[in-house]
Amino acid sequence: MVTCLKLGDVRIHRIIEQEAPFFELKAFFPALTDEVLEENLSWLQPKHVDPTTGKLVLCIQSYLVQTPHHTILIDSCVGNGKARPARPFWHMMTSDRFERGLAATGVHVNQIDYVMCTHLHVDHVGWNTRLENGRWVPTFPNAKYLFADRELAFWTERHKDQPEACPWISDSVLPIVEAKRFELVKSNHSLSELVHLVPTPGHTIDHYSVRVGKVGADAFITGDMVHSPLQMRYPELGMMSDFSSDQAGQTRRVVFTQLSDTPTVVCTGHFPSPSVGRITRWDNGFRFLEN
Ligand SMILES: [Zn+2]
């Protein structure tokens, strides 16, 4: 499924790789209490929490942004043929869904100018590379891949110490570095007057989100600064792979305060379809109003 959003001269497409119940809710949100869960299950089920398994439903997707000047892929899902023994549902995937989704936008892999990885986790870097004659090569041969400088430094170091703990760095990040297709940027980098990175640290050390379009007709592509609307209602609720849940919570509160009750379209990384909407206040937190 591909949906297209038009904001002035900017078009935004979703490219979905997977959408399914993936994680045990209380493992995913370690600080979630039974009481809070109970209070929210009525609106979380069945869309966000699968009633049969109790697992959190997530969409794994990329956003393709077309401006008059650039074609940009934001995040690159899990990818095919990659060994992920710790995550059976992402292990050695053979799906053609991502490639079909990209083809449906009419954009060819050669036409991507930039690949932006909001952060360097397994489900955001996968299609950076593909296997060719036994080697991992850039999937988007003409693209520059934008990595936040402190994010790449952190994961390069982690990979040196414990390569088996982050196999995606071996097959989906370092080959881009070796092929010299990357560009190191600050997480507040501006690509053009229509595309700005916004630092949203906490989930990872130097995570960024991306703001596109002109003020009044813009979108905020979150990456993983938020995983579920439950973290909008409770911005301080951390998730299991956070670098710093405290910092991630502060980031959410600041960003949601800025975005709430504005026309800015919020394009989330992992919310179930349609994944896109606006933010309004809800008690001491925020509510996601789907498009
Ligand atoms: Zn993610």
Image (tube, helix red, strand yellow):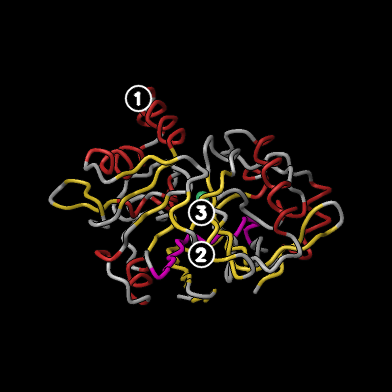
Instruction: Name the residue that disc number 2 marks.
Output: 19
Q: Which amino acid, by three-letter code, is at mark 3? A: His
- Judge by depth and name the residue closer to the eye, 137 or 85: 137
Secondary structure under the numbered disc 3 in the rendered image: strand
Of labels 2 and 1, earlier in sequence is 2
> Mark 2 touching mark 1, by CB under 8 A?
no
Instruction: Name the residue that disc number 1 marks.
Output: 160
Of labels 3 and 2, earlier in sequence is 2
Q: CA distance from mark 2 to mark 1?
A: 33 Å
Secondary structure under the numbered disc 2 in the rendered image: strand
Location of residue 160 with respect to 119 vertically, above or below? above
Task: Give the side of residue 140 with respect to residue 68, left or right.
Answer: left
> Mark 3 touching mark 2, by CB under 8 A?
no
| Image coords of residue 175 (percent x, y) | 25, 41
| Image coords of residue 236 (percent x, y) | 74, 42
Q: Is residue 192 magenta?
A: no
Instruction: Name the residue that disc number 3 marks.
Output: 196
Q: Which amino acid, by three-letter code, is at mark 1? A: Lys
Residue at x-position 51% and y-position 64%: 19
Residue at x-position 27% and y-position 57%: 140
Residue at x-position 42% and y-position 27%: 158
Q: Residue furthest front?
A: 193
Instruction: Specify few, some or many for label 1: CA neighbours under 10 Å numbering under 14, 14-19, or 20 or more.
Output: few
Q: Which amino acid, by three-letter code, is at mark 2? A: Glu
Closer mark to the observer between disc 2 and disc 1: 1
Rendered image quadrant of residue 154: top left
Task: Give the side of residue 244 with respect to residue 262, left or right.
Answer: left
Secondary structure under the numbered disc 1 in the rendered image: helix
| Image coords of residue 156 (percent x, y) | 37, 30
For the record, the magenta segment spans: 52-68
Residue at x-position 53% and y-position 66%: 213
